[in-house]
Amino acid sequence: MKAIAGVAADAFAKSGLLGLLESLDRNTDRVRVVAYHRVAEPGEEPDLDPGLLSAPPEDFRIQVELVARHYSPISLDDLVAAHRGERSLPPRAVLFTFDDGYRDFAEHAWPILERAGVPAVLFVPTAFPDQPGPGFWWDRLHAALARTDRREVDVAGLGRLPLTDPAERRAAHRAIRTRVKALPHDEAMKWLDDTLAPLGEVPSVHRVLGWDALRTLAHDGLSVCAHGHVHALATRLAPEALARDLATSKQAIERELGEDAPPAVFAYPSGAEDARSRTTVREAGFELGFAGERAIDRLPFADPASVKRLPMLNYASALFRAQLRPSVAALGRWLIDERAARAA
């Protein structure tokens, strides 16, 4: 389906209609917040979940250059000032954002952004920098299933899951991932540990940038912001635990970055949010909360604690460019809905 959409987007771009729409767009109330996770070559880190790969470096370079040529890259400061009513956004505003703080951001993404003069925001779960540990749970799950020689695994609540071929391992990954996201955070992490234990030892998949690297990036102009403390879904923490997690992550950013700390904004881990978590984000002192709903947002924000983004799914350049058009952005939502339906 994504391939078909890519062909259509490529034809749209080559027809000249896409460029015409871009040139005629003078609206200054829209902001396209594009969201990435990892920028790396496929297979560069085989133990990491390939589902978090947003773009290979060369594709990402093309995307950044397309934005620099046809749109108006903005910084987090620009967006916050516009939200406050202190300035207007330029036409066709685009903000680049990245979640999780993987090391490949510094290796691949930031040099491309710097060369193009394009600002960006990196959302980091503050418990991870410089803390030795096994890594993100989804990477641990991927590595355990990829490395095990077991032909099946008995999983509490799911029964026996076959692992005899890649398709069965992908199906097991989807089933376990869905279960993890449905449980309260602490219970989910304990359940996952129990699930992975029979699969054998897995080396650490911790790949988050350390604070020294983050401070250097922040000093060079990157906005390093909070992505929670332990990367728990905001909807899977009790109210008091969520308030503590938000306060801890906010304080860590301010303490570690000092004068290079950006305005207080937050990105919901996995985009998971609801009315209760939005209220808690506001009460924690965050001006903006970047959420999971896929759309192009408009100022003034309907809810500053739920700013919409455009997740990048390893798109070809034409499809990436088409996603930035309000009339076409719904296509990406359809792709994500279809992917979710096929994964269910």
Image (cartoon, grey):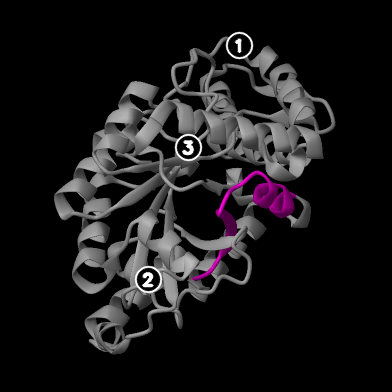
Q: Is residue 84 magenta?
A: no
Residue ID at (69%, 13%): 198
Looking at the rendered structure, which numbered label has been put on residue 100? 3
Asked if the residue under mark 2 is in contact with the one under mark 1, i.e. CB atoms within 8 Å, the reply is no
Q: How many marks?
A: 3
Q: Is residue 295 magenta?
A: yes
> Looking at the image, can residue 238 be seen?
no
Q: How many other residues sit within 10 Å of disc 2, few (<14), some (14-19) or many (≥20)?
A: few
Q: Nearer the viewer, residue 247 or 26?
A: 247
Asked if the residue under mark 3 is in contact with the one under mark 2, i.e. CB atoms within 8 Å, the reply is no
The magenta stretch is: 277-296
In the rendered view, tell whether residue 182 sits above or below residue 340. above
Q: Earlier in the sequence, mark 2 or mark 3?
A: 2
Per the model, the C-alpha gap separating discs 2 and 3 is 30 Å
Q: Earlier in the sequence, mark 3 or mark 1?
A: 3
Label 2: element kind: loop
The location of residue 12, given as percent across then percent down, is 31, 82
Name the residue beneath numbered marker 2: 87
The location of residue 20, given as percent across then percent down, is 26, 88
Q: How many other residues sit within 10 Å of disc 3, few (<14), some (14-19) or many (≥20)?
A: many
Looking at the rendered structure, which numbered label has been put on residue 200? 1
Label 3: element kind: loop
Asked if the residue under mark 1 is in contact with the one under mark 3, i.e. CB atoms within 8 Å, the reply is no
Q: Quadrant of residue 8?
A: bottom left
Disc 3 vs disc 1: which is toward the camera?
Answer: 3
> Looking at the image, can residue 189 be seen?
yes
